[in-house]
Image (cartoon, rainbow, N blue to C red):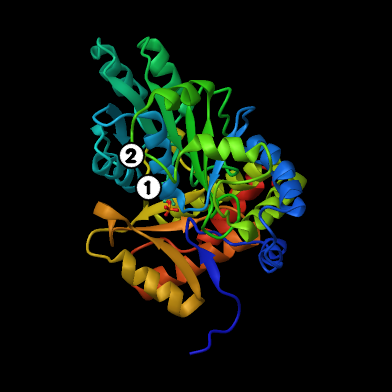
Amino acid sequence: MRMSGRHFLQIPGPSNCPTPVLAALAKPTIDHRGPEFRALIEGLLPKVAGIFATKNPVVIFPSSGTGAWEAALVNTLSPGDRILMYETGWFAKLWSDLAERLGLLPEVIRGDWRGGADPAAIAARLKADHAHEIKAVCVVHNETSTGAVTSVPQIRAAIDEAEHSSLLLVDTISSLGSLDYRHDEWGVDVTISGSQKGLMLPPGISFNAVSDRALDASGAASHMRSYWDWAPIIEANEKGLFPYTPNTNLLQALDVALNLMLEEGLAAIRERHSYAGAATRAAVRHWGLELQCVDEAAQSDVLTAVRLPEGHSADDLRETVLARSNMSLGSGLGQLTDKVFRMGHLGDFNLPQILGMIAAVELGLTEQQIPFRPGATEAALQELLSIGH
Ligand SMILES: *Cc1c(COP(=O)(O)O)cnc(C)c1O
């Protein structure tokens, strides 16, 4: 059945791609060993490093974010290594499951999925590890299943306070570009990211930004690796090459996306996300519904996860919103399946789109007979006016 009007992709990634990015994808594939590609890579790598705020190399993989999770682990660790992971939600859990399958020994601090990683719990565990058996601390910066942000500087401070030698590995797959992030300044050893969230590209590119300590660790780490090995990629990149066929068309589009981001300005992008987050949370509070993230300081400006009252189905609500308003909302993941729906506000969007999203959800809440207080678009508008937009 034809649906009139545009489709609203309001899931927290993959996000909407701007037209110039889509146009770049439609350009002919180029020779990945030719001068045009070399010029592309020479211009692209410094811009990529800029987004991570690092002076060190950023390794690019032709994969989804999951590949970059694996790459971060197999390049820095050896089989049987103990690592400390904090379960902030579904994505943190997937990462620890992956680590276990790789033969590492993840020790998981289980959070309640309603806030960020607790630096005090991490410091306490590291202090008790007198033999420094824990080789890496792994956290997710923006937990996309719950809408909670972990303070990376606080996690760094926890490791330093414990005077522990562990590496710090951070997943920024859904935060890079959209939230403040500083790989070098915050003392992160490996930053993992992906193309399809804040960077406004389709899925298919992932990243590892690496510190000097991570590079040193990769020299000593004995985990089996081939496709994900940093060293041949970093070496080939110096000549504008990759050791295997890179996804040329996505890299052409990445260059365009980064140019758009630099043109808008990273500070302006973050401000736009913070306005969208504040407006969306104001709407949820007006409805009288509960935010999944209960820590005020940890609220994500990338997405808002909303709990429905007992006895109501979040998946039925999402189905109604899709059928009635041609709008996709994010589903609840893992233990939050059918209990939570997620509104994405990341990447390429403007504020009228956010107000449209709130209105469409309100129509869906009415149709599903979920108890709520109507009028949240006005509440969101007032929030935007009060923060001076
Ligand atoms: C989307 C996402 C992932 C998963 O990446 P894939 O591209 O699906 O492999 C991992 N971590 C976080 C925080 C994410 O938002």
Q: Where residue 192 is drawn, which disc sits there?
A: none
Give yes or no for contact between labels 1 and 2 (Cβ–Cβ under 8 Å).
yes
Q: What is the CA distance from the residue labelled 1 to the residue labelled 2? A: 8 Å
Q: Where residue 88 is drawn, which disc sits there?
A: 2
- Residue 156 vs 85, above or below: the answer is above
Q: Position of residue 215 (x, y in %)?
A: 49, 25
Q: Three-letter amino acid code at disc 2?
A: Thr
Nearer the observer, 381 or 81: 81
Residue 370 in view: no
- Residue 317 vs 347, above or below: the answer is below
Q: Where residue 146 is drawn, which disc sits there?
A: 1
**In this picture, residue 170 sits left or right of residue 377:** left
Nearer the observer, 39 or 64: 39
Q: Position of residue 27 (x, y in %)?
A: 71, 67
Instruction: Name the residue at 42% across, 48% down.
Output: 67
Q: Earlier in the sequence, mark 1 or mark 2?
A: 2
Q: Three-letter amino acid code at disc 1?
A: Thr
Instruction: Name the residue at 39% across, 18% down.
Output: 158
- Residue 133 vs 142, above or below: the answer is above
- How many neighbours does mark 2 have within 10 angstroms: few (below 14), some (14-19), or many (20 or more)? many
Q: Position of residue 262 (x, y in %)?
A: 74, 44
- How many neighbours does mark 1 have within 10 angstroms: few (below 14), some (14-19), or many (20 or more)? many
Q: Secondary structure at mark 2?
A: loop
Nearer the observer, 115 or 251: 251
**In this picture, residue 93 sits left or right of residue 351:** left
Q: Secondary structure at mark 1?
A: loop
